[in-house]
Image (cartoon, rainbow, N blue to C red):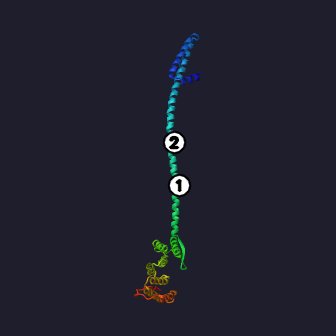
Amino acid sequence: MTALHGAMAASLPRAAIFFLGLGLALAAGQAKAIFSDDEARRAIIELRTRVEALDTRIAELEKNLQTSSRSQLQLLNENERLRAELAQLRGQIEEATQTASTGKTQQKDFYVDLDQRLKQIEPVPIVVDNMTFQVTRGEKTLFDELKEALRNGEFRKAVATAEAFQQNFPSSRLSPDVLLLKGSAFYAEKNYKAAIAARQEFLDRYPNHTARPQATLNLAASQAESGNPNTARGILENLIKSYPNSPVAAEARERIKTLKSGPAPKAAAKSTPSK
């Protein structure tokens, strides 16, 4: 019964409690005809006690309701804060994932580039004139391209490749051979002036090279084709004196026979090797 009153009081405002108490008091007054004065006083005291208990309960309920409202507001605020933090964390995760992906790509690109660079300087064997020695991959690649261009009759490409080689590898062991091939490309293009310059440069820079006799013979041919037969003859005669028993000496004698006399001879190029 007390629980029932408590439930009713919890759903009524304080004014309703007043009227409820008044009604109970009137009922108590009518009960005087039935109960004795002592019993009536005890009933009234009990009712008042119940009313006070209900009032206290309602006050507690209102307080709890206010507290609950504040708690709900706090929960809502906390929920919004957590949602914001969650969104921020997701953004950071996405950014970190993207960074990691980019970092892996950059790392892969770095190692690929490093591998390519190492391959360019890694020594590889090459055979030139029956001699094997070590050069970098870059040197070998350009040298092979130069020879391929000459074989295919791409003389301008051969000249460009030779010049690229000289620029990139000025101290290469293949430099003498590149210079010889460059002279041959100029000669094939009928650029005899450039061929003379390239072959003379070879003779000046590499006095002890094994290809010197052939380079001297080629220089004479360039001079003859450029309209300087007397200069060519002088070069061939010096070649015969320097290498009298060599195959190129025999070739030089045959070429002298075919040369026609021209204007006053020019100074012959030096071709005497260091023995």
Instruction: Using the image, determine if residue 121 lies above or below residue 27.
Output: below
Query: Could you tell me which quadrant the N terminus lies in?
Result: top right
Secondary structure found at label 1: helix
Sequence-wise, the earlier of marks 2 and 1 is 2
Task: Tell me what residue is drawn at x 51 percent, y 27 percent.
Answer: 62
Q: Position of residue 175 (x, y in %)?
A: 48, 76
Of residue 255 and residue 22, the one placed in the foreground of this image is: 255
Instruction: Name, please, the residue furthest toward the left.
Output: 264
Q: Position of residue 220 (x, y in %)?
A: 46, 84
Q: Amino acid at mark 1?
A: Ser
Q: Which residue is mark 2?
A: 83
Instruction: Using the image, determine if residue 102 lies above or below residue 184.
Output: above
Q: Position of residue 103 (x, y in %)?
A: 51, 56
Q: Which residue is mark 1?
A: 101
Instruction: Using the image, determine if residue 110 lies above or below residue 10.
Output: below
User: With 196 as the anchor, is 2 left or right in this view?
Assistant: right
Of residue 42 and residue 67, the one placed in the foreground of this image is: 67
Task: Tell me what residue is drawn at x 51 percent, y 63 percent.
Answer: 113
Q: Amino acid at mark 2?
A: Arg
